[in-house]
Image: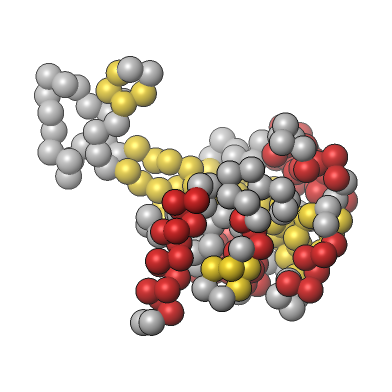
Amino acid sequence: MKTVAFVPIRLNSQRVEGKNLRLLGGEPLLCHILRALLGTRGIDEVYVYCSNETIRPLLPEGVQFLRRSEELDRNTTLGAEIYDAFVAEVPADLYVLAHATSPFIRPETIDRALEQVCSGAYDSAFSAEKIQTFAWYGGKPLNYSPEHIPRTQTIEPVYIETSAFFIFPRTLWCERRRRIGDRPYMTIVDRIEGMDIDYPEDFAMAEVIAEARGTE
């Protein structure tokens, strides 16, 4: 079984200017997820999927660059369009879609998810954060009744997808255009592993974490 990981990269980030190339812990943000993928035992090839070849010299050894159409850099481009294009160019049995905005995900976490999918017990996997607190959605309580307020230790948890990774077989995407199947393995990550850098304050927090880890 061939397993390919890919990280879609665009350089015209709207919310955090130059985000993917901005230094975090002494190297560009995009390098952190790439090193995690390179350190994952179950992955055969790692790609960066980007329209701008100027990032080639920044890529860690072992990462392959695949140039994508600049049409995919539009602000209105859907993720599905990018996945369609990559899957059409790079055949594999299993894909690991990962994002540079999750710099603290660990190789062993990805390996654990891959093992579950490869075992046949699950048809896909994704990273998620477990939130065990009082949650509301659509103006109503989601996981408790206001008439019977539970202890937070016993409240029904809510699980939030993170952007770190999604693992799916080629057949699932090509036949149903889904990155999460009907029997997914939910890979629970802590708040640091699940961090997703979307806004300037997220990057500021990531810098604090990276600096703290560098002094350990």
Q: How many marks?
A: 0
Side (left or right) of 85 relative to 196: right
Whole-percent x, y for residue 20 in the image: 64, 58
Instruction: Specify the quadrant that holds the C terminus.
Output: bottom left
Q: How far across and how far down the image is residue 84, in percent?
A: 79, 40
- Where on the picture, by quarter, is residue 206? bottom left
Residue shown at the point (54%, 57%) measured from the top left: 102
Q: Provide residue 211's location: percent of width, then percent of height.
A: 42, 73
Colour convention: secondary structure
Measured along the vertical axis of the image, is residue 186 above or below residue 55?
Answer: above
The structure residue drawn at horizontal position 71% and vertical position 48%, both measured from the top left corner, is 12
Q: Is residue 98 visible?
A: no
Picture residue at 82% right of the left edge, 65% below the top: 54
Query: Position of 86 compared to 24: left or right?
Result: right
Task: Please state if 160 lies on the left or on the right of 28 as rendered.
Answer: left
116 or 178, nearer to the observer? 178
Is there any visible trace of residue 22 in the rendered image?
yes
Looking at the image, the residue that sits furthest to the bottom is 216
Image coords of residue 199 (percent x, y): 51, 47
| Residue at position x 85%, y 62% in the image | 53
Image quarter where the N terminus lies is bottom right
Q: Nearer the viewer, residue 119 or 26?
A: 26
Q: Identify whether 74 is placed above or below 10.
A: above
